[in-house]
Image (tube, coloured by chain):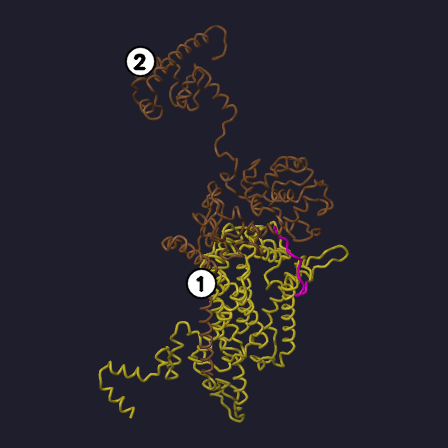
């Protein structure tokens, strides 16, 4: 009956057809923009033809999409970087990188610029979150052994991508560190003082490094403009380039490491070649099996079109990241202390929180033996973190765990190295916690519930 | 999987929309908007809707470039220069008029006298009794905390930023008392103040800049504040710093408060010289210059000095010396004019040509009597010159003019 009616209207005018089509659509679809690919080909095209989406494959395995394997930490980092780029771009119109005006322009942001407090708060929270999430991303990759090459695929080089990742973590820290100075308040000034003083304790290169970073021997206008240019131009540019390369490498390395086990499973199911039969081709090749492709896997099995499965998850992750950042922005007020004053050292003077484990290490490794004080800045501030970064870079090349341990959480084969890694991470987290919440005036230990001595005021 | 994700997407989307709405709400429901609305109601009630419509809305500010201050106090305190709201409740009250005549809002702003955080547009931050802001509004709240009888007294500390070199200033009773005490007790016997004084005690010229952290509050009961420390120290120096050799002057608490305000006002602030009371912004002539001008004014050539002829011309024989010497020496004008213009001096001065016609028409309008006086004097000058020449050519080699 209904089909009869439709066929009848088909003969009517174009407008009539349109009216009919609209009437057939449910109200919900009329009000919303929806699109569903009709065929697999259309779904693939939707990815490949889209400028932004084309870095994803047309089809993606279900395990790479799972929440529990990757926690989407890399994606969250990228989304945070996007939020930071957008808010930072707007903030650049409002902030003046001069010693005389920087602090005042931040005060203006807080009090008189429309949504200034929101932009600054969101930028700050996203920056802190990015440091945390990039670090967690690294922890995830290590614990799942995702820096290891699996099957011998052309151009697979996961260790290289891991090193790119380590570089990105360091750049993230630098981005945050350079941004820390810009408000030009006491918090900024002294955090950078502590941070750069640790850097200067390196032998031979220490002082020149500090001199180049500060553009002199004291934190002044030259430092501010250097940090500003690094923060707003050079480091974001480097991040953008490296993130793009990082993403491209993930594709070149055959996707997320968790897909490796598909090849392992396929290998097990592979029928062994018949030993009695020889495949030598006029004696040119040897062996008893065709070695063109040693593992045959069904590429279509367990794979879904990226559109909409991946794109929807991507949208969910993006919105969730934005949601959490905004929520935190509303809950935590961005601090702005007194204007920077080189003559007054706050007590205690702390580095940015993500360097507080280093400041703690410096404290721990500073000790007095028979009247001689050994400054821990070299051991705790330079050698130890230097060794950690070097170890991180080299680790994939010394990791001899079997291929079967790649892309899984808590594999038995990697038990010991994961334990060592977790202990290091826990130590860093504990030291960071102590430095952030338990160090009070004169760098004394205060329990979180203990009150600090009342800070003096003018009136 | 897809439909579950779609639901998550919708939940996220709707939550974000709600959060965006909240951010919009928070941005647009600030307290200052309420104050502005209330002020508009008050004006409508008192002066009619037409006046109310003229009230500006949005964040208002006074930008004093010279003092590097931005004061947004007027966002809520909108009636500062209104007439007829002298008794209205704050923040809608008119500012007392007298003080504003010499200290206009546009040149001084608000915080340079009252204290407070001028940038801020929220009440607690603006009134400055918050963390990380050391200049609270110096009014009732702080006065009550320190039991100061006159709630306006604290503000005198800020007045003294510009008035620090005044011996006494009208209306600054506390600071005036303190300045008297500085002389009376001879603080300069031990302390240097403004570059003058002894070296037994510390230099107090910039005592007000001393950071809060540099005081020892260990023996202080009550609030850990510089003002509290200063007051306690003035009342009993040894109590707050046992090693001090400063004598106890037995000051009353009010005197101690006044002195605390005075020393805390001594700050190295970048204030333009034009704001500082007592500073003369002009070229002051040297004593020699003053003496020379006085001599010229008392000599025979006084006429040429009084009438500014000496700006261009010397009349050396009458003791008038021009600094610029743009025109010829008038000592021999009697012959010189004849040589230059082919006219007599009398004739020329009555009806000059060239530069002199312009000068006498526009710069130095001389009456006919004055011109005759000038002619007579110039004749005397020529006579003098001849006499001096004869003296100089005589055998005894005495220098000219002696």
Q: Which chain is yellow?
A: A
Chain ID at mark 2: B
Q: Secondary structure at mark 1?
A: helix
Q: Secondary structure at mark 2?
A: loop
Q: Colour of chain B?
A: brown
Q: Is residue B338 visible?
A: no
Q: Is residue A24 depicted above or below A381 in this figure?
A: below
Between B161 and B1, the one nearer to me in the picture: B161
Between A333 and B231, the one nearer to me in the picture: B231
Q: Residues within 10 Å of mark 2 (few under 14, many from 20)?
A: some
What residue is at 62 percent from the left and 78 percent from the top? A414
Chain ID at mark 1: B
Query: Which residue is the site of mark 2?
Result: B344
Quadrant for the N terminus of chain A in the image: bottom left
Is residue A450 highlighted in magenta?
yes
**Side of B298 relative to B353 (left or right):** right
Between B284 and A143, the one nearer to me in the picture: B284
Query: Which residue is the site of mark 1?
Result: B28
Q: Position of residue A354 (x, y in %)?
A: 59, 64
Majority secondary structure in the magenta region: loop
Which label sits in the foreground, 1 or 2?
1
Is residue A46 highlighted in magenta?
no
Report the span colored magenta. Answer: A446-459
Q: Position of residue B396 (x, y in %)?
A: 50, 7
């Amino acid at each position: 009956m209904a089909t009869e009616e439709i066929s009848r209207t088909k003969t009517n005018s174009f407008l009539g057809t349109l009216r009919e089509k609209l009437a057939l659509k449910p109200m919900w679809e009329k009000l919303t923009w929806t699109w569903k690919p009709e065929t697999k080909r259309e779904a693939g095209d939707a990815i490949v033809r889209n400028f932004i989406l084309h870095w994803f494959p047309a089809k993606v395995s279900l395990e790479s999409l799972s929440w529990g394997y990757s926690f989407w930490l890399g994606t969250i980092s990228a989304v945070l970087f996007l939020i930071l780029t957008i808010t930072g771009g707007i903030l650049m119109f409002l902030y003046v990188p001069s010693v005389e005006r920087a602090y005042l322009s931040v005060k203006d942001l807080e009090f008189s610029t429309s949504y200034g407090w929101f932009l600054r708060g969101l930028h700050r929270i996203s920056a802190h979150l990015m440091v945390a999430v990039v670090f967690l991303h690294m922890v995830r990759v290590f614990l799942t052994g995702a820096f290891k090459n699996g099957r011998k695929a052309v151009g697979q080089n996961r260790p290289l991508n891991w090193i790119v990742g380590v570089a990105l973590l360091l750049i993230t820290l630098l981005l945050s560190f350079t941004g820390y100075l810009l408000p030009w308040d006491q918090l900024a000034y002294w955090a950078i003082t502590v941070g750069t003083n640790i850097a200067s304790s390196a032998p031979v290169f220490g002082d020149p490094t500090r001199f180049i970073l500060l553009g002199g021997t004291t934190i002044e206008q030259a430092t501010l403009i250097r940090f500003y240019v690094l923060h707003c131009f050079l480091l974001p540019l480097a991040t953008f380039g490296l993130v793009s390369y990082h993403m491209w490498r993930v594709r070149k390395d055959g996707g997320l490491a968790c897909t490796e086990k598909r090849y392992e499973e396929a290998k097990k199911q592979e029928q062994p070649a018949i030993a009695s039969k020889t495949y030598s081709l006029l004696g040119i090749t040897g062996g008893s099996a065709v070695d063109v492709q040693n593992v045959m896997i069904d590429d279509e099995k367990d794979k879904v079109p990226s559109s909409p499965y991946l794109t929807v998850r991507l949208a969910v992750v993006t919105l969730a990241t934005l949601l959490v950042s905004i929520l935190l922005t509303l809950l935590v007020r961005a601090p702005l202390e007194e204007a920077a004053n080189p003559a007054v050292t706050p007590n205690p003077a702390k580095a940015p929180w993500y360097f507080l484990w280093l400041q703690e290490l410096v404290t721990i490794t500073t000790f007095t033996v028979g009247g001689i004080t050994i400054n821990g800045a070299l051991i705790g501030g330079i050698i130890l973190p230097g060794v950690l970064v070097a170890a991180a870079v080299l680790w994939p090349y010394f990791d001899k765990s079997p291929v079967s341990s790649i892309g899984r959480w808590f594999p038995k084969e990697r038990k010991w190295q994961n334990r060592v890694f977790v202990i290091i991470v826990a130590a860093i987290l504990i030291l960071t916690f102590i430095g952030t919440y338990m160090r009070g005036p004169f760098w004394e230990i205060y329990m979180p519930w203990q009150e600090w001595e009342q800070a003096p005021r003018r009136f | 999987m897809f439909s579950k994700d779609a639901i998550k997407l919708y939940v996220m989307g709707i939550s974000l929309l709600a959060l965006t709405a909240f951010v919009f709400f928070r941005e647009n429901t600030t307290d200052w908007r309420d104050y502005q609305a209330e002020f508009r109601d008050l004006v409508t009630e008192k002066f009619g809707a037409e006046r109310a419509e003229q009230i500006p809305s949005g964040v208002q500010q006074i930008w004093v470039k010279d003092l590097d201050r931005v004061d947004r106090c007027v966002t809520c305190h909108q009636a500062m220069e209104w007439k007829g709201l002298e008794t209205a409740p704050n923040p809608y009250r008119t500012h007392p008029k007298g003080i504003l005549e010499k200290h206009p809002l546009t040149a001084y702003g608000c915080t340079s006298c009252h204290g407070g955080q001028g940038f801020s547009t929220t009440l607690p931050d603006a009134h400055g009794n918050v963390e990380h802001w050391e200049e609270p509004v110096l009014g009732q709240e702080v006065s009550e905390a320190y039991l100061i009888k006159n709630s306006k007294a604290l503000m005198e500390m800020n007045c003294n930023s510009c008035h620090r070199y005044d011996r006494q200033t009208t209306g600054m009773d506390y600071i005036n008392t303190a300045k008297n005490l500085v002389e009376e007790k001879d603080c300069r016997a031990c302390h240097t103040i403004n570059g003058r004084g002894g070296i037994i005690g510390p230099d107090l010229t910039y005592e007000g800049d001393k950071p809060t952290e540099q005081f020892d509050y260990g023996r202080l009961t009550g609030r850990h504040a510089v003002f509290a420390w200063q007051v306690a120290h003035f009342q009993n120096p040894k109590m707050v710093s046992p090693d001090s050799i400063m004598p106890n002057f037995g000051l009353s608490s009010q005197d101690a408060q006044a002195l605390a305000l005075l020393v805390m006002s001594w700050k190295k602030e970048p204030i333009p010289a034009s704001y500082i009371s007592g500073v003369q912004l002009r070229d002051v002539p040297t004593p020699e210059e003053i003496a020379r001008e006085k001599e010229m004014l008392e000599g025979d050539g006084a006429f040429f000095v009084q009438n500014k002829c000496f700006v261009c011309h010397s009349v050396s024989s009458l003791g008038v010396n021009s600094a610029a010497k743009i025109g010829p020496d008038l000592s021999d004008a009697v012959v010189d004019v004849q040589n230059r213009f082919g006219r007599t001096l009398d004739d020329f001065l009555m009806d000059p040509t060239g530069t002199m016609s312009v000068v006498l028409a526009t710069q130095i309008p001389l009456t006919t009597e004055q011109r005759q006086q000038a002619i007579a004097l110039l004749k005397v000058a020529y006579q003098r010159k001849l006499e001096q020449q004869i003296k100089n050519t005589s055998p005894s080699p005495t220098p000219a003019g002696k």
